[in-house]
Image (cartoon, coloured by chain):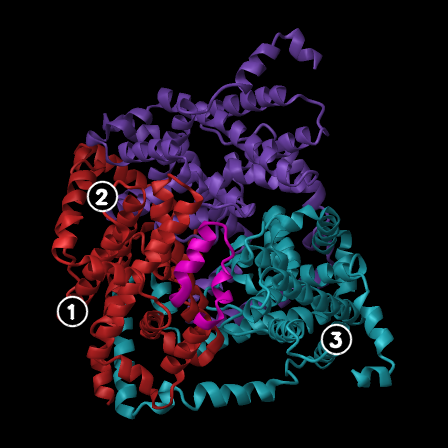
Chain colours: A purple, B cyan, C red
Amino acid sequence: MDLFEVLHLDHLAHGLANLSMFPYFDMAHYVVSVMALREQPGALEVSRVSPLACWFSSMLFCFGGAVLSGIMLAEPPVAPLTNSSSVLLASVIWYLVFYCPMDLVYCCTALLPLRLVLSGMKEVTRTWKVLGGVTQAHSKYKDSLLVMIAIGWAKGAGGGLISNFEQLVRGVWKPETNELLRMSYPTKITLIGAVLFALQQTHYLPLQKHHLMLIYTIFTVINKSRMMLTGSTALPFAAIESAIYKTLFTGSSPYAALTGEAKKACIDKRTTNRTTSTAATKESSENGKAGKHTPDSSVKGQSESLRAKEESENTETTSCKKTN
Amino acid sequence: MDLFEVLHLDHLAHGLANLSMFPYFDMAHYVVSVMALREQPGALEVSRVSPLACWFSSMLFCFGGAVLSGIMLAEPPVAPLTNSSSVLLASVIWYLVFYCPMDLVYCCTALLPLRLVLSGMKEVTRTWKVLGGVTQAHSKYKDSLLVMIAIGWAKGAGGGLISNFEQLVRGVWKPETNELLRMSYPTKITLIGAVLFALQQTHYLPLQKHHLMLIYTIFTVINKSRMMLTGSTALPFAAIESAIYKTLFTGSSPYAALTGEAKKACIDKRTTNRTTSTAATKESSENGKAGKHTPDSSVKGQSESLRAKEESENTETTSCKKTN
Amino acid sequence: MDLFEVLHLDHLAHGLANLSMFPYFDMAHYVVSVMALREQPGALEVSRVSPLACWFSSMLFCFGGAVLSGIMLAEPPVAPLTNSSSVLLASVIWYLVFYCPMDLVYCCTALLPLRLVLSGMKEVTRTWKVLGGVTQAHSKYKDSLLVMIAIGWAKGAGGGLISNFEQLVRGVWKPETNELLRMSYPTKITLIGAVLFALQQTHYLPLQKHHLMLIYTIFTVINKSRMMLTGSTALPFAAIESAIYKTLFTGSSPYAALTGEAKKACIDKRTTNRTTSTAATKESSENGKAGKHTPDSSVKGQSESLRAKEESENTETTSCKKTN
């Protein structure tokens, strides 16, 4: 691609592509992941009640992508445990973040400047993970774009996608929220990355791999830093997103389209369904509720979890500045 | 088998056995499945809040059997995604059923005559799926009747068997109901089919494969049509079923058998257990409830879900007749 | 090892190592497992509502370890079904324990002396299962100690580790308790066994396999009998356990370490998180609860389930003495 030669970025791209993630970038990934876990509501209590559950949760935060993509490809989900050095490194970091005397480690890493660097480095690992997933899927299923995207996405955003089950390990169960119902920023950016790398892999995207890696990495790092500094969760492509959504999914939706009468009929139907369900499951009220929670409630539910996540990555630092 | 030659059904049987499911029968299967999803309580809201979750749910409805049997045989659950044409077809149908302008597609397909044809065709695909599962298991585990039945059942009724997790994708969680606790009609008929085909495969059933396919297909199609027309959910073999149940599981049940004293003792025991559990989990009330919900409640709970399903396949049409 | 020759235990160890688990020891394992299921709250109701769900639950109790380790190693979780004789034996026992006329079988096996013998034999099978898991993992992943421990643990204590999903089959859902959050005695002892056998396998532990088998088996059997006779759940290594816990996880915990101010800040943070979560999920109250249940509640919740289990193995017999 000429532009790269013009800007003399070819060397940079090659350098980046040959960068090794272990140990420094992996370490940053583990630190940020374990801190995100620690900042989940109730996580500190769990770390006291059962260090083992806490450790297992941390490993799911650190290696969730590998576990999920392993399951999806029918490869042993225990495989990540075979990489002793990584597991050891992650475990040490888990211990320091949760149990370090004077809580020094957490409060240092929670300082904005350091956290900014660590989060940036974590974003770099994202590129490698997505690419790894895409190539792994490509080697198994030559031409299946969908599988490449799915595996790349799973490998890059696994921790988020399996969050329901990671929470279950800690005794928390929030069925009304998951990353598919309302995607958080990391999940979205990873999905985009997976699509791009899959297109590059299948030569639909006229870019060299190391160039795409450079572009995607720079984009994610800059975007992440911007979000942490401004504390905003607005995405650069939010406009495109909502445009696509409006065109495809709302304009021609049943609600908008159906005549008032039909709409009424449909709503009546749903209401009756719900009534029966409430009647039937009156003993286990939460299900009736789960059954009939409205878009608003879901949105609320998820935006809450979203906010929690963002907090855990952005505004968290404040509480610890108080600490020192 | 003489009878077949006498009735000149041999040709018909062979013709049926050589029938290709793709694209028309598969299409019917996808349409009916996606409509069943759309008629689940809350599904329309989800289709507005998160098209992605809705799409994923639809794929689980359409390819649930392949996913489940894949997991059970340790084969990649993403495999169905490799069949691009099927996924594309299912996705198009998903889009049309949920987001078609004026909601035309849904309301046409929901008309009884068309729906009748589509459901009949879907029943035909059931035969192929069950047979596919049984032969797949047979090729891996030569003589294991149980595995053949399990895989055939999973492949034919997968969507229902994984419904708890399919609902979780949509943010709904109904732990007190599942297809094992109270089987819906499709699950039952699929189980019977799996048993028959497994017996045929292992030559315990003196029938040729294509003859059994013809008999089973005719039975399922006729039975399904009857149920849709009469709106009854009574099974032709309900009598046999309850007879077997009475003989094996109630007559000699602890309740009936135990002396009053013993029964009392057992009940006391359970009550105390529950009391502790209630005391212990007073913060999360739903578990206490789940812990002590009685048969009645379960029955109610499941019959409700059952009714919902049946509605979604039988009486649904009414609300849409209003529409047009 | 000299000591063994001195005590003439070498023959005994060899004899034990060559002992066959099938059918007698397996039978004992199935009986005790199915009885443990029957003594779960609500299990008897399920056995009436849906014998199939009850049977499936029993199989998970009997073969849970094989299923879990199968999933972890990406081997077919249906594999246990291929061993027809074992499945048949387990099914017969399931039927007799739940549906035997006059409930004879359950009430006989529930008598303390017989139950003592059966539980002892079940403990013997534990040694074989753990060892089987460790060797299986060793053959796949030569040097990975962690994987050996994980698989050995999963194979030996699978039924407990997957209890959340086993309960789901019966329509019960208790997210706030799991074996990782609060390990029951069998899970703990199995973990220790897995560690020991993994160390032996990798020659870090200077013991011959059959010697270790003898030592571990004797320890588990004696310990189990002691617990059943005294009704105490105190472990011989409880002291060591709490010492390790105190040294590693409490002394230097955030709570203890943080200054009052910091602690307050952290608590404030968590509280606000919770408030938002409660506000957001006000429609599905149980999640708010799950989100904010305190260590105490967890401890209660789990100690309850623990007690239930222990009851089911120790003090259960009383209620049935009344029976006869």
Residue C288, can we see it? no
Magenta span: C61-86
Distance, label 1 to label 3, CA atoms, is 60 Å
Distance, label 1 to label 2, CA atoms, is 35 Å
As drawn, the label of residue B208 is 3
Residue indicated by mark 1: C231
Q: Chain of mark 1?
A: C
Q: Amino acid at mark 1?
A: Gly
State the SS at label 3: loop
Q: Quadrant of the N terminus of chain A?
A: top right
Residue B159 lies, in percent from the top left, at 60, 62
The one of A89 and A228 positioned closer to us in this rendering = A89
The one of B177 and A87 positioned closer to us in this rendering = A87
Q: Which tag is nearer the camera, tag 2 or tag 3?
A: 2
Q: Amino acid at mark 3?
A: Gln
Label 2: few (<14), some (14–19) or many (≥20) C-alpha neighbours in 10 Å: few
Asked if residue A100 is positioned above or below residue C161 in the image, the reply reads: above
Label 1: few (<14), some (14–19) or many (≥20) C-alpha neighbours in 10 Å: some
